[in-house]
């Protein structure tokens, strides 16, 4: 089994080979570990929603957007 160090080394080598050094750096810069507590934030935002609430919002969006694609 490869160690995390070996996996990273091989991954970086593959990225550099496929994308070039500049492309590898640009690719890696897309990723950010973020900050805060995702689980706590998710609960704050979504705990009050039910499946019915979400379904109703989808239906509302569909009915609002139904005329847009008919042109």
Image: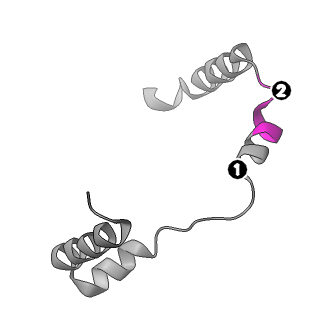
Would you say 51 lies left or right of 30 here? right
Would you say 49 lies left or right of 33 here? right
Residue that extends furthest to the front in the rendered view of this protein: 1
Residue, x 83% and y 40% (percent of image)? 44
Residue that extends furthest to the top in the rendered view of this protein: 52
The location of residue 56, given as percent across then percent down, is 69, 16
Q: In the image, which residues are magenta? A: 43-49
Q: Quadrant of residue 45?
A: top right
Residue wearing tag 2: 48
Between 40 and 9, the residue placed more toward the observer is: 9
Residue wearing tag 1: 38
Q: Is mark 2 on a helix, strand or loop?
A: loop
The location of residue 30, given as percent across then percent down, is 46, 70
Q: What element carries label 1?
A: helix
Between 33 and 65, the residue placed more toward the observer is: 33
**Image quadrant occupied by the C terminus:** top left
Residue, x 78% and y 37% (percent of image)? 43
- Count every numbered label the image shows and give the total: 2
Q: How far apart are marks 2 and 1 (CA)?
A: 17 Å
Residue that extends furthest to the bottom in the rendered view of this protein: 22
- Front of the two marks 2 and 1: 1
Q: Is residue 3 magenta?
A: no
Q: Does the magenta stretch include residue 44?
A: yes
Q: In which quarter of the image is residue 25?
A: bottom left
Between 7 and 69, the residue placed more toward the observer is: 7
Residue, x 45% and y 76% (percent of image)? 29
């Amino acid at each position: 089994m490869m160690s995390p160090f070996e996996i990273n080394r091989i991954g970086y080598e593959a990225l550099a080979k496929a994308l070039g050094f500049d492309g590898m750096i640009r690719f890696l810069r897309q990723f950010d570990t973020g900050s805060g507590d995702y689980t706590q934030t998710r609960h704050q935002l979504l705990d009050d929603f039910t499946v019915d609430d979400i379904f109703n919002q989808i239906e509302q969006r569909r009915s609002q957007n139904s005329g847009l694609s008919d042109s």
